């Protein structure tokens, strides 16, 4: 039997960390190499697979794992990437709220290790992004693009990483970067809509796992492309599929579309 792939979980005590641990425990070809949490977290020191949850630094886990899975916070990314590079571990980055400097750090690390960054690891959203790019390319700039997302009351970043990724897909369909088309948040007397722009709206409440709609609106008609996550299991499943796929890949930056084909 082939060697099992050793997976380390960054943010092991979090909502996604727990959902991913459940998926790995049910996968005979994978083994938990341990986890990392923030100092003082109740999970610190608890046994996890072949290791335990450590709360000091990521380096020992990166050395013990073939692949790390990171669902933490943007503030943790630099240290997580550094540990992955030093430990020669691949890394799946699912954390959202990333800024240009985080993406530059991912690009640098991808020169020496395999990295997959995705704001949404579900199969449905991976396909939705492709459909959105095709739709905006086909429809042209007379169709206004608005992206609406709703998430649970605990979410800390807005717009969601997925909404921004769908915005990137819509902008790509128009052959432009999102930065050139994105509108500022609307509040007060905003003036009329700027032609060709892409708008975002974020709702927060309850336990919603993640809903995203891309609305394409023209004079007299409207298309709405919607994805609804019914639970975190779809993200966890995709993250584990990505980790398995990435574990033995050469250095480089990859996306979920590479995994699902
Ligand atoms: N790509 C995708 O498909 C998905 C992405 N996400 C994203 O994943 C991230 C996590 O989401 P979720 O699990 O709901 O959030 P949680 O807050 O439940 O989990 C994050 C965990 O990481 C820990 N953490 C935060 N910062 C650090 C740090 N510097 N070092 C070590 N541990 C740290 C947190 O500890 P503490 O509680 O002490 O802060 C917490 O236990 C978010 O950015 C979210 O948007 C979520 C779902 C799907
Ligand atoms: O924080 C969440 O929960 C989610 N975050 C991701 C995002 O920001 O897009 C993915 C998913 O929608 C759930």
Image: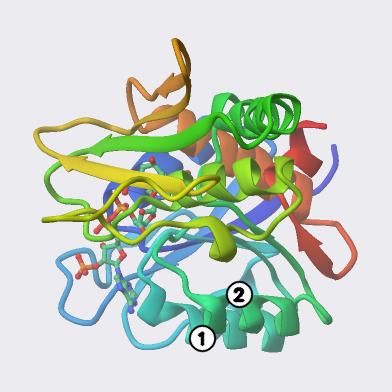
Q: Which residue is mark 1?
A: 78
- Residue 138 screen position, x and y as percent: 75, 25
- Residue 130 screen position, x and y as percent: 70, 31
Q: Is residue 153 above or below residue 60?
A: above
In the image, 6 versus 110, the foreground residue is 110
Q: Earlier in the sequence, mark 1 or mark 2?
A: 1
In the image, 49 versus 133, the foreground residue is 133
The 10 Å Cα crowd at callout 1, few under 14, some 14 to 19, many 20 or more, is some
Q: Which residue is mark 2?
A: 103
Which secondary structure lies at badge 1? helix
Q: Is residue 152 left or right of residue 105?
A: left
Which secondary structure lies at badge 2? helix
Q: Viewer-nearest of labels 1 and 2?
A: 2
- Residue 93 screen position, x and y as percent: 55, 61
How many labels were placed on the picture? 2
User: Do the numbered discs 1 and 2 sit on residues whose CB atoms are within 8 Å?
Assistant: no
| Picture quadrant of ligand 1 | bottom left
Quarter holding residue 170: top right
From the Cβ of disc 2, is ligand 1 less than 8 Å away?
no
The 10 Å Cα crowd at callout 2, few under 14, some 14 to 19, many 20 or more, is few
Q: Is residue 229 left or right of residue 124?
A: left
Name the residue: 66% across, 62% down. 67
In the image, 92 versus 21, the foreground residue is 92
Q: Is residue 158 above or below residue 130?
A: below
Q: Is residue 168 above or below residue 23?
A: below
Residue placed farthest to the top in the image? 220
Name the residue: 58% across, 58% down. 178
Residue 51 visible in the displayed image: no
Name the residue: 39% across, 46% down. 199
């Amino acid at each position: 039997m082939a060697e099992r792939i050793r997976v380390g979980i960054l943010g092991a005590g979090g909502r996604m960390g727990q959902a991913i641990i459940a998926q790995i425990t049910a996968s005979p070809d994978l083994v938990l190499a341990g986890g990392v949490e923030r100092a003082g977290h109740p999970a610190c020191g608890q046994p996890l697979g072949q290791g335990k949850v450590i709360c000091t630094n990521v380096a020992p886990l990166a050395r013990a794992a073939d692949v790390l899975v990171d669902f933490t916070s943007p503030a943790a990314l630099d240290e997580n990437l550094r540990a992955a590079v030093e430990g020669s571990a691949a890394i799946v980055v699912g954390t959202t709220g990333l800024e240009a400097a985080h993406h530059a750090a991912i690009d640098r690390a991808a020169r020496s290790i395999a990295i997959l960054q995705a704001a949404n690891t579900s199969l449905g959203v991976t396909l939705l992004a492709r459909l959105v790019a095709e739709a905006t390319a086909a429809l042209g700039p007379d169709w206004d693009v608005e992206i609406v997302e709703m998430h649970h009351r605990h979410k800390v970043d807005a717009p969601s990483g997925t909404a921004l990724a769908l915005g990137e897909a819509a902008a790509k369909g128009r052959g432009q970067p999102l930065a050139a088309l994105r509108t500022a948040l609307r509040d007060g007397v905003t003036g009329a809509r700027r032609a060709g722009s892409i708008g975002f709206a974020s709702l927060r409440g309850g336990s919603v796992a993640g809903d995203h709609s891309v609305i394409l609106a023209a004079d007299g008609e409207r298309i709405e492309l919607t994805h609804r996550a019914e639970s975190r299991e779809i993200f966890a499943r995709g993250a584990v599929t990505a980790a398995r796929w990435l574990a033995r890949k050469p250095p480089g930056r990859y996306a979920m579309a590479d995994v699902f084909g």
